[in-house]
Image (cartoon, rainbow, N blue to C red):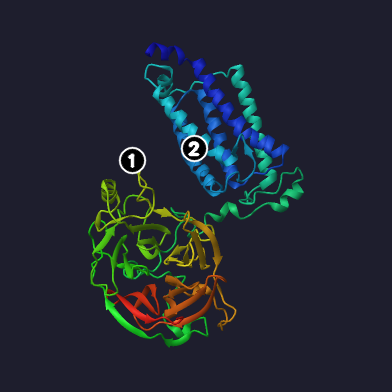
Amino acid sequence: MKELFDKLLTEKNFNIVMTTAVLIILVVPVGMANLYLGFVKGESPCLLCGHERLGMIIVGILGLFMVRYGVKIKYMVAVFLTGFWFLYEGLRHVGISGQGDIGQGFGEAMFGLHTYTWAFVVYWVVILAMAVMMLFIRKDNLLGKELLDSEIKIKEFSQYGKAVFVLSAFIVFTNVVQFFITNGPPPFGGRGAPAATRFTWDIGLASKFWDPVHWHENFRPGKWSLLGFNQGPKPWIAGANENQDANYPIDTNPSNSPILSQNQTPLSLIATKEIGIELKNYAGSKTYAGGLAYDKANNQFALIGTGASVYFTDSNFAESKEFATIDQPNGQDIPITVDATFFAPGKVVATAYNKAIWGVERVDSLDETDKYIQWEFLPQVEGNLLPAFGKKNEALYKNTKGQRLSLRTTRAKKNYVLSLAKDPDSRYFYMLTVAAKKAPNVILLKFDTKDNQISEETILEFGKGLQLKEGAKVNNFYITGADIVDGKMLAISKNYNALLVIDLASKAITDAYTLPNIGDASDIAIKGDELYILTREGGADKVAVVRNPIK
């Protein structure tokens, strides 16, 4: 094998392979994007496209250095660092446009892939190729000797190498021309989306579109973050996360409500009930009460723990003979569970604040496969309970019974939720978002239980009949829980201690009431003419029973 490697790994063969790699990198993605898409079709590159082309040019030049001066550690390290950084650029670019529907993308595709996808592929292949090349380095072969030799020896290009060098220089030059005309000299920089205006040789016309912002915007204070835009303050969760979002301060005073017509007389408090059930997570650690749901068919409540647990109980909340905890670490991330609703009799579904839902359902009996499913997904369980989502399969490695789902949205990607409610008269369930600095609207989300996919996303509005203060905004309210009856959603707002009535047909707030002083209200379950409100007061979770104002 050693002899075979020595025969194949000659200087001539290495130079041919490396020169061909340079040719492929610079001619196919860089050359075609520049000459064909740019000069022929008039497509101008965006800011990230320019970065990615620059990285490919650097890799190509380093390849020519290896042919000209030999394989050196500094060249190899430079290739790896270039591939590392620009692979991130490509991944970032794919992440922006790669989530579109089938056939969608930014710019025109080349051989079935959009140019930003080619960037990701090219840098991935570059890193892989360099790693493979290192496998062939031996101290007594060509690569090893050049790597260890500190002396720089200038080697002549072959005719093939000279041709590739000239072609590469030409492609670099034409890219410089294109980017100069498209983006202009410093301090102007490349544009994001939309990309610069279609390519024209008329510099006077092109200069009207030069962007003076992008080159320095990343150096603004507070701009840099490891999480980028995918971050924001976690929502207020009674007991579990009592930290205010500075952009949306908590104000529980009803008189400050933006709705002038909010009934200032508190709703009648019928009773307050202590919760006698100790809520725990999968590891047996104590948690807080995160949600409450009512099953009308079975006249039963489900009390949800913030650590992904469910306890079936009656209206006294004293004990639970059927309960389950979810194997929280395995599967979709469910950080803190905040609300729940019944999808069907005996089938309760809960959500974490990140829109990840999980569920538990009651079954008549358990067979042997069910017991294995319980062991896998429900670390602590009492009763004939199974996970609500997925399909059962006796071949356990194929079993999906126990999966949880991350609900996808468009308008509400940057919003958390604290509410979940199923309409008992339809197949749809709903969520309301919590306003955030980067996503200030309160969005009413509608999902179909047939496939648990988004059906509608609507910005919640005030109804026409409401009397409002000047400058009133829906996001003045901080909605922490909801339930539905007769086409009306009743939602609790921590701000202004309010109970909002939302008409699901018009997607608007039509009325508002003031809750009694019952502590930190976090969820609601409707039972006839009574509202069971989950609250936290004096360091303990309780349930307040309040008169239903719309019955």
Residue at 54% of width from left, 62% of height from top?
457
**How many numbered callouts?**
2
Q: Which residue is mark 2?
A: 82
Who is closer to the viewer here, 211 or 284?
A: 284
Residue at 38% of width from left, 48% of height from top?
391
User: In this picture, is 472 found above or below 132?
Assistant: below
Marked residue nearer the N-terminal end (2 or 1): 2
Looking at the rendered image, the quarter that the N terminus falls into is: top left
Give amino acid for label 1. Answer: Tyr
SS assignment at label 1: helix
Tell whether 250 sits left or right of 39: left
Q: Give coordinates of residue 54: x percent, y percent.
A: 57, 39
Residue at 46% of width from left, 24% of height from top?
71
Residue 436's tag is none
Looking at the rendered image, the quarter that the C terminus falls into is: bottom left
**Is residue 90 visible to us here?**
yes
Q: Give coordinates of residue 48: x percent, y percent.
A: 57, 45
Alpha carbon distance from label 2 to label 1: 41 Å
Who is closer to the viewer here, 61 or 294?
A: 294
Give amino acid for label 2. Answer: Thr
Residue 9: quarter of image: top left
Residue 387: quarter of image: bottom left
Q: Which residue is mark 1?
A: 397
**Is residue 154 visible to us here?**
no
Extreme residue toward the bottom, this view: 265
Label 2 neighbourhood size at 10 Å, few (<14), some (14-19), many (20+)?
many
User: In this picture, is 525 found above or below 551?
Assistant: above
Q: Give coordinates of residue 182: x percent, y percent.
A: 68, 46
